[in-house]
Image: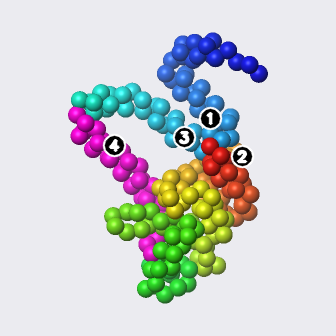
């Protein structure tokens, strides 16, 4: 299907801001590769007017711009840690049935890319969903996908993907929820495949 891009662009320009946001949100929902980021992008777009005002202020003061960026990132990371159960390296050892004094277990798993290790205030935090405490192991599907999506190289990005809900296959649960529930290994592989394909 050939689309007249200029005509489409003119139509889009005529939309109100609210209509444009709704159109983009609907379009993101229709495209499987964009569903994982739909809510984040829609939220950012909705903040556009406030961000534009902040940008105008920041241009006048580059130091303030750097501080504002740091605050925004810190706030996003803090909410991720506050909203989800995290383990320190000692708790990881306990969850896996190892001696509580063995911190090397968590470090080895993070070094191999099997688990997400979030750097926070000089320590590492490990999202708890990664560990099956009954079987005393890292969930195999989690380890597999963490290596695929590059959890070692981008732990915050990987954590964000796992912990935020998606609309994949009309299931609003997060990938972490699907991993914990079990029986969704192929769905998780498909979702991670879509992520790395982008």
The residue drawn where x is 61% and y is 13% is 6
Count of all numbered marks drawn on residues in the image = 4
Magenta stretch mostly in which secondary structure?
A: helix
Label 1 to label 3: alpha-carbon separation: 9 Å
Which quadrant of the view contains residue 35? top right
- Percent across and percent down for residue 184 are 72, 59
What is the crowding at mark 2: few (fewer than 14 residues within 10 Å), some, or many (at least 20)?
few
Which residue is under mark 1?
Answer: 28
Give the image location of residue 3, x and y in percent.
70, 18
Tag 2's secondary structure? Answer: helix
Q: Tell me the residue that label 2 is attached to.
A: 169
Q: Earlier in the sequence, mark 1 or mark 3?
A: 1
Q: Residue 42: x percent and y percent? A: 52, 35
Secondary structure under badge 1? helix
Q: Is the residue under label 2 in contact with that under label 1 (CB below 8 Å)?
A: no
Horizontally, residue 77 falls left or right of residue 186, namely: left
As measured in the structure, the alpha-carbon distance from the residue carrying label 1 to the one carrying label 2 is 14 Å
Instruction: Report whether 165 appears left or right of 87.
Output: right
Name the element at disc 3: helix
Q: Nearer the viewer, mark 2 or mark 4?
A: 4
Sequence order check: which comes first, mark 3 or mark 4?
3
Circles 1, 3 touching at the beta carbon (< 8 Å):
no
In the picture, the disc for residue 69 is: 4
Give yes or no for contact between labels 1 and 4 (Cβ–Cβ under 8 Å): no
The stretch drawn in magenta includes residue 73: yes
């Amino acid at each position: 299907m050939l689309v007249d891009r200029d005509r489409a662009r003119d139509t889009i320009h005529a939309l109100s801001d609210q209509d444009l946001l709704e159109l983009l949100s609907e379009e993101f929902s229709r495209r499987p590769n964009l569903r994982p980021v739909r809510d984040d992008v829609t939220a950012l777009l909705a903040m556009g007017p406030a961000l534009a005002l902040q940008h105008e202020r920041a241009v006048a003061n580059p130091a303030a711009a750097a501080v504002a960026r740091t605050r925004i990132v810190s706030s996003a990371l803090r909410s991720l840690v506050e909203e989800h159960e995290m383990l320190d390296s000692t708790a990881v050892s306990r969850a896996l049935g190892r001696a509580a004094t063995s911190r090397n277990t968590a470090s080895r798993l993070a070094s191999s890319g099997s688990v997400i290790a979030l750097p926070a205030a000089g320590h590492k935090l490990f999202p708890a969903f990664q560990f099956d405490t009954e079987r005393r192991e890292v969930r195999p599907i989690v380890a597999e996908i963490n290596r695929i999506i590059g959890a070692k190289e981008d732990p915050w990005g990987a954590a964000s993907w796992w912990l935020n809900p998606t609309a994949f296959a009309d299931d609003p649960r997060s990938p972490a929820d699907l991993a914990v529930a079990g029986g969704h290994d192929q769905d998780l592989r498909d979702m991670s495949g879509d992520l790395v394909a982008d």
